[in-house]
Amino acid sequence: MANTVRLGIIGVGNMGLGHINNAVKGKMPEIAITCVADIDPKKFDKAKELLPDVVCFPTAEALIDSGLCDAVLIATPHYFHPPIAIYALQKGVHVMSEKPAGVYTKQVRELIDVAKQSKATYAIMFNQRTNCVYRAVHEMVQSGVYGEMRRVSWIITDWFRTQQYYNSGGWRATWSGEGGGVMLNQCPHQLDLWQWICGMPETIRAFCHVGKWHDIEVEDDVTIYATYPNGATGTFITSTGDCPGTNRLEITLDKAKILCENDTRTGAYDVWVYELETGTQEYIKTAADGFSKPKGAWRKVETDGQNPQHPGVLNAFAAHILRGEPLVAAGEEGIRGLTISNAAFLSSWLGETVTIPFDEDRYYDLLQERIKNSTFVKTVNEQVQGDMSSTY
């Protein structure tokens, strides 16, 4: 049995080069990057500088058909994720897709159907699931030890971007090139974490402000209100126009409140829990005093401190292929966060509450209308970002 997975990287932009850098630094010992593909041959120079023996291909299909790789990592603009993944899976090549799984759920559902029929592995790069803070929160909520969720609120506005960021690529922040803005580029991780921790909402009412802070044709400021099957409610607020931004996740459960918040002074992002001696709903019903509150105390949650991010996801991917070990996130899970963002767009476009599941054909048709009727003129001044985190 082979002891390494031969990996081909499709798309040698910021993310693709970031993965190559991680490999060069020895962070993925069971992965050997053997080949890359990009429609822009100029991007091969940097790849070959880092990996002199890497073989370069002008198309994803040529790379997949070459026989030089066991798996591919798709790091192209969003619309290309599903068709490339489908092609690879049908050829028996394992797939790791960058987020998001795609632009619209109808297309991703087709991909999932192909993945179910393929013997190859389909996984998605939800690297924030490796963060010890989010793993701890997921375990606390999903364990049920604190009872049912009553409310969740996530303010995630530390995505500040300049106009030059949007001008750095012709595909960025356009309906035809990216299919959305902050929800499709920056927030797929948080939308995934939201549903991974709290479960899928039942309804969505959203307000997606287009070009509020930047000269773009897609959303850069969003507020989502969600309801859950058990009656819980949630809000999700995000923007690329706030500075300093906030990253605050607050989850109210029957017997506790969980709080994660970034400290803009120190950069720390810890998790705390306020544990109640008596459940909230029981206390509401039985307390003799109209103004008393159930007793409780704050406790800082200890984590394992591990946060392996992209290398951790790829190491698990290789271990799954080689030995059947668990993935960080199966590719089929990518449709869940995308469902929330598609529902939010649809709600904002229609000006009404959307129930999940929604009409995927209607969403697709409205997206195509925006692409067809776009009159936006994009200014492009390409530049290569310095590190992978700049794309989040």
Image: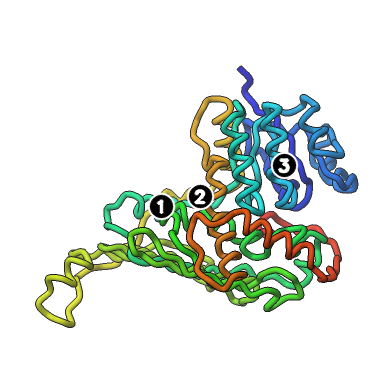
Q: Is residue 250 visible?
A: no
Residue 38 location (% of width, % of height): 83, 43
- Mark 2 surroundings: few (<14), some (14-19) or many (≥20) residues within 10 A: many
Residue 356 location (% of width, % of height): 49, 57
- At 75% from the left and 71% from the top, the residue drawn is 216
Classify the position of the C terminus by image quarter: bottom right
- At 60% from the left and 34% from the top, the residue drawn is 115
Q: Which disc number belongs to residue 138?
A: 1
Label located before the other in sequence (2 or 1): 2
Work out which residue is located at the far top of the displayed protein and give it: 1
- At 63% from the left and 59% from the top, the residue drawn is 363
Q: For the residues marked 2 and 1, what is the alpha-carbon distance in whole angstroms?
A: 9 Å
Nearer the observer: mark 3 or 1; the answer is: 3
Q: Amino acid at mark 2?
A: Arg
| Residue 231: quadrant of the picture | bottom left
- Mark 3 surroundings: few (<14), some (14-19) or many (≥20) residues within 10 A: some
Classify the position of the N terminus by image quarter: top right
Q: Is residue 173 left or right of residue 141?
A: right
Find disc 2 in the rendering and name its residue: 129
Q: Are marks 2 and 1 in contact (CB under 8 Å)?
A: yes
Q: Is residue 320 left or right of residue 110?
A: left
Q: Amino acid at mark 3?
A: Pro
Residue 225 location (% of width, % of height): 47, 70
Label located before the other in sequence (3 or 2): 3
Find disc 3 in the rendering and name its residue: 83
Out of 307 and 205, give the one closest to the viewer: 205
Q: Is residue 197 visible?
A: yes
